[in-house]
Image (tube, grey):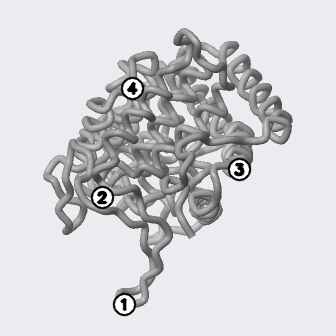
């Protein structure tokens, strides 16, 4: 069975507009309601919401590909790149991988109006693999691939090929056609297209070309973020599509494989993509509630002179249950490990927070003594 990029009409995608209109209308409405709600919030809350959303996007996009990033490092990098006062955010110097992914998402969203070019995409991909390696494998960084590419799963000797990209010699021409189309909105004679549908088509088209040796999924999702930012005419992100894709990863890969082995009718992919986006918008409620809770906490603590260690641990406690938050009980030994300090320093920091009634001691004692945020925090 041929792949869609091998069909005579490639890349003349088609879709059933009538089937897409109901979900397009719902998603646009939820998009507008979310943006409207956030406009009513103060600058501090909006800035924190943007930091959390961009952080989640970077962390989860990498996680889809099996790469685990430290959310605290990504958050620190995002805050620095956005020029936002970090308040209670830990002042952790970002590791290379975390900083690279944060930089790609920030560039896509913050500079969404700038043209998407081959050079820009190559710079993003090079940032992912600066030493020219992915794990133990050498990767051609900063340029289009010059060999075949396959998506494979399964043990050695019994691999299953899910997808094969176009021949390498076709990649420059295919990418030129993609980039012309992506930047055609508003050009004389251009056919109007719903911007959310444009984001869906862009994602599928780019991952099907598979222009790089590695990093194609992350680059495609960054391009999707750029398209979504254009659809909202705003660099402010209040939800993370990659977080929802990560939660539905098996379905994501399944629908991509099905459509890439089908004909050029991409209605099924567009319906899945828009449904996933709708669920991402719905799921933003919990993330924004956590942002509001944190903002209220740090605002109410404005007169308290926390040291950097206390700010770091309190931020982890406030993030408990989310990506990058503290898992399990807080003990003095964990405080030492998190902050890189002595037992005496950890005890002194904790005692101050207990005295200020910000922490409380959990039932139990001795070596199992642990602490949690005190009510009402």
Q: Which residue is mark 3?
A: 272
Where, by quadrant of the figure, is residue 146 drawn? bottom left
Residue 62 visible in the snapshot = yes
Q: Secondary structure at mark 1?
A: loop
Q: Tell which of 245 and 198 is nearer to you.
A: 198
Rendered location of residue 355, percent (x, y)? 48, 40
Q: Are marks 1 and 4 in contact (CB under 8 Å)?
A: no
| Residue located beneath label 2 in the image | 337
- Against 189, residue 27 (above or below) is below
Q: Which residue is mark 1?
A: 157
Q: Nearer the viewer, residue 37 or 358?
A: 37
Indicate the position of residue 114 as horizontal and vertical percent values: 39, 17
- Taking 245 as reference, is 153 above or below it? below
Distance from Cα at disc 4 to Cα at disc 3: 25 Å
User: CB under 8 Å between callouts 4 and 3?
Assistant: no
Q: Residue at x 45, y 57 (%)?
A: 63
> Tag 2's secondary structure?
helix
First-in-chain label (2 vs 4): 4
Q: Which of 228 and 115 lies nearest the eye of the viewer?
A: 115
Residue at mark 4: 116
Estimate the spatial distance between the alpha carbons at disc 1 and disc 4, rounded to whole Å.
40 Å
SS class, disc 3: helix
Disc 4 element: loop
Left/right placement of residue 26 relative to residue 140 reads right
């Amino acid at each position: 069975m041929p792949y869609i990029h091998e069909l005579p009409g490639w890349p003349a995608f088609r879709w059933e507009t009538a089937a897409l209109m109901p979900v397009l209308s719902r998603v646009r409405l939820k998009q507008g309601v979310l943006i409207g709600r956030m406009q009513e919030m103060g600058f501090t809350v909006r800035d924190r919401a943007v930091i959390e959303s961009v952080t989640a996007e970077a962390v989860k996009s990498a996680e889809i590909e099996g790469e685990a990033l430290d959310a605290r490092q990504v958050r620190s990098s995002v805050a620095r790149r956005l020029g936002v006062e970090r308040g209670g955010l830990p002042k952790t110097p970002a590791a290379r991988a975390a900083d690279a992914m944060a930089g790609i998402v920030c560039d896509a969203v913050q500079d969404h109006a700038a043209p998407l070019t081959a050079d820009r995409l190559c710079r993003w991909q090079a940032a992912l693999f600066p030493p020219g390696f992915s794990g133990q494998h050498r990767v051609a960084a900063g340029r289009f691939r010059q060999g075949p590419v396959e998506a494979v799963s399964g043990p050695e000797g019994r691999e299953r090929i899910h997808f094969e990209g176009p021949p390498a010699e076709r990649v420059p021409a295919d990418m030129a056609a993609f980039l012309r189309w992506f930047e055609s909105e508003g050009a004389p004679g251009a056919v109007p297209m719903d911007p959310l549908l444009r984001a869906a088509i862009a994602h599928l088209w780019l991952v099907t070309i598979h222009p790089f040796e590695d990093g194609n999924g992350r680059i495609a999702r960054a391009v999707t973020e750029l398209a979504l930012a254009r659809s909202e005419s705003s660099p402010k992100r209040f939800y993370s599509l990659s977080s929802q894709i990560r939660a539905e990863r098996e379905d994501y890969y399944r629908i991509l494989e099905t459509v890439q082995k089908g004909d050029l009718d991409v209605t099924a992919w567009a319906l899945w993509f828009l449904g996933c986006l709708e669920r991402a918008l719905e799921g933003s409620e919990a993330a924004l509630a956590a942002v509001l809770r944190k903002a209220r906490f740090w605002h109410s603590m404005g007169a308290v002179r926390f040291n950097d260690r206390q700010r770091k641990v309190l931020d982890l406690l406030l993030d408990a249950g989310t990506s990058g938050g503290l898992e399990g009980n807080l003990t003095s030994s964990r405080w030492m490990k998190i902050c890189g300090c002595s037992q005496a320093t950890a005890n002194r920091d904790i005692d101050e927070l207990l005295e200020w009634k910000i922490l409380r001691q959990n039932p139990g004692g001795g070596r199992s003594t642990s602490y949690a945020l005190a009510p009402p925090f």
